[in-house]
């Protein structure tokens, strides 16, 4: 039996509603379609069980063809219900997946549904193959399911797809966007590579100072969420002692933001943080600890100008429809809120995210140049982000 209806899941966690996906609507021939539940294509029952733990309902199919038949039936059905998202197991032939994608793209309603590959069990070579072909909207790993980030990615993809649908096939705007992206990337590579080369002796001196004062790695590497909730390794010079992350709860009472996760974004900022070393204090005051982020720029994880990439504990609170928009812009070393902050002692978390959203709405290469012109040094920013 290829079609299986999955019943509603039972939820014990009352905070789930904070991460639930907002209902979206699509219009086709004056008919409104409501998004509801997930579709899973494949035979991995463990993946289906994990999805059931987060979604209210879903459907599972053993083949792409049976999924296509059900979607066609749904478009003609009076219930007007289509899935919020379609997950596809990676075991299917790439040609079959490509044909299914063409089927979705040929319908204005179905093309708005995020089509996501479950990359669990794939080798790096196989993953890169899917990334290069760009048939899927995103790749997730349901064997290591992280509910908040999967929902965040879906929310982001829905925003992107709804924007594309509203713009339509305006090729002049697409060409302009492609040119803007090319100029931005070329600028990032030239600037980051030049500065990394020129400042390599300074890198060595800083590394030596850090090692002389305290044991441990020269670099602090943490997971950050950038554009499209992409998670990457974020580099800074280490400014704290070993085990500083494990001690964060001990100093939560010193947090300047003290935000409520249920009502808005969460940020952690501590003045005179006792975990910071003497060398680390100097690096922070001069913003030299930020220099390794040029490696992230060179690798393509970040840009010179953009919204600051967020630690995972902060990003996971920004999956609601209102806040997710800030992830449509590239992650950057410097950005709009760093400029607006100048001359002010502090800025609230809501103000920062509001400026991030403003940048996401207006970002382009010329705007980036304006932001850099307003910044005495685009690469050395005094921030604890």
Image: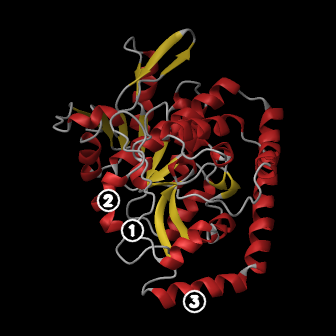
**Real-space Cα separation, disc 1 to disc 2, in angstroms:** 9 Å
Residue 128, x across and y down, in percent: 56, 64
- Please say if the residues under marks 1 and 2 sit with CB atoms less than 8 Å apart: yes
Say whether disc 3 or disc 1 marks the residue closer to the N-terminus: 3
At x 57%, y 47%, the residue is 345
The reply to whether residue 136 is visible in this rendering is no
- Which-is-in-front pick, marks 2 and 3? 2
Residue 243, x across and y down, in percent: 34, 74
Which residue carries the number 3 mark?
Answer: 208
Residue 51: quarter of image: top left
Say whether disc 2 or disc 3 marks the residue closer to the N-terminus: 3
Say whether disc 1 or disc 2 marks the residue closer to the N-terminus: 2
At x 50%, y 88%, the residue is 211
At x 77%, y 57%, the residue is 376
User: Looking at the image, which is closer to me, 110 or 294?
Assistant: 294
Which residue carries the number 1 mark?
Answer: 274
Residue 111, x across and y down, in percent: 56, 31
């Amino acid at each position: 039996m290829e079609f299986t209806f999955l019943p509603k899941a039972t939820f014990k966690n009352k905070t789930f509603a904070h991460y639930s996906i907002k209902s979206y609507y699509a219009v086709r021939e004056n008919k409104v379609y409501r998004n509801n539940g997930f579709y899973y294509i494949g035979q991995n029952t463990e993946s289906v069980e994990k999805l059931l733990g987060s979604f209210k309902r879903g459907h599972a199919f053993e083949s792409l063809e049976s999924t296509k038949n059900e979607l066609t039936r749904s478009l003609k059905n009076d219930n007007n219900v289509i899935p919020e998202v379609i997950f596809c197991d990676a075991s299917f032939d790439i040609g079959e997946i490509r044909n299914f994608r063409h089927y979705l793209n040929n319908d204005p309603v179905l093309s708005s549904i995020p089509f996501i590959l479950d990359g669990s069990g794939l080798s790096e070579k196989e993953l890169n193959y899917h990334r290069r072909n760009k048939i899927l909207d995103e790749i997730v790993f349901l064997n290591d399911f992280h509910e908040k980030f999967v929902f965040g990615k879906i929310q982001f993809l829905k925003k992107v797809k709804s924007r594309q649908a509203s713009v339509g096939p305006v090729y002049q705007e697409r060409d302009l966007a492609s040119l803007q992206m090319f100029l931005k990337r070329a600028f990032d590579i030239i600037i980051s590579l030049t500065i990394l080369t020129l400042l390599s002796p300074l890198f060595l001196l800083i590394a030596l100072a850090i090692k002389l004062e305290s044991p441990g790695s020269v670099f602090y590497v943490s997971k950050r969420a950038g554009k499209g909730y992409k998670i990457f390794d974020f580099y800074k010079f280490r400014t704290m002692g070993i085990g500083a992350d494990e001690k964060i709860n001990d100093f939560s009472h010193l947090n300047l933001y003290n935000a409520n996760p249920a009502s808005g974004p969460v940020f952690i900022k501590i003045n005179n943080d006792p975990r910071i070393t003497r060398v680390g204090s100097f690096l922070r005051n001069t913003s030299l600890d930020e220099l390794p982020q040029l490696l992230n720029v060179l690798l393509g994880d970040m840009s010179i100008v953009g919204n600051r990439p967020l630690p995972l504990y902060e990003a996971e609170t920004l999956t609601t429809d209102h806040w997710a928009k800030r992830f449509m812009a590239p992650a950057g070393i410097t950005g709009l809120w760093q400029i607006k902050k100048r001359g002010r002692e502090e800025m609230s978390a809501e103000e920062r995210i509001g400026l991030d959203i403003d940048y996401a709405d207006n970002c382009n290469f010329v705007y980036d140049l304006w932001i850099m012109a307003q910044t005495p040094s685009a690469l050395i920013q005094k921030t604890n982000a």
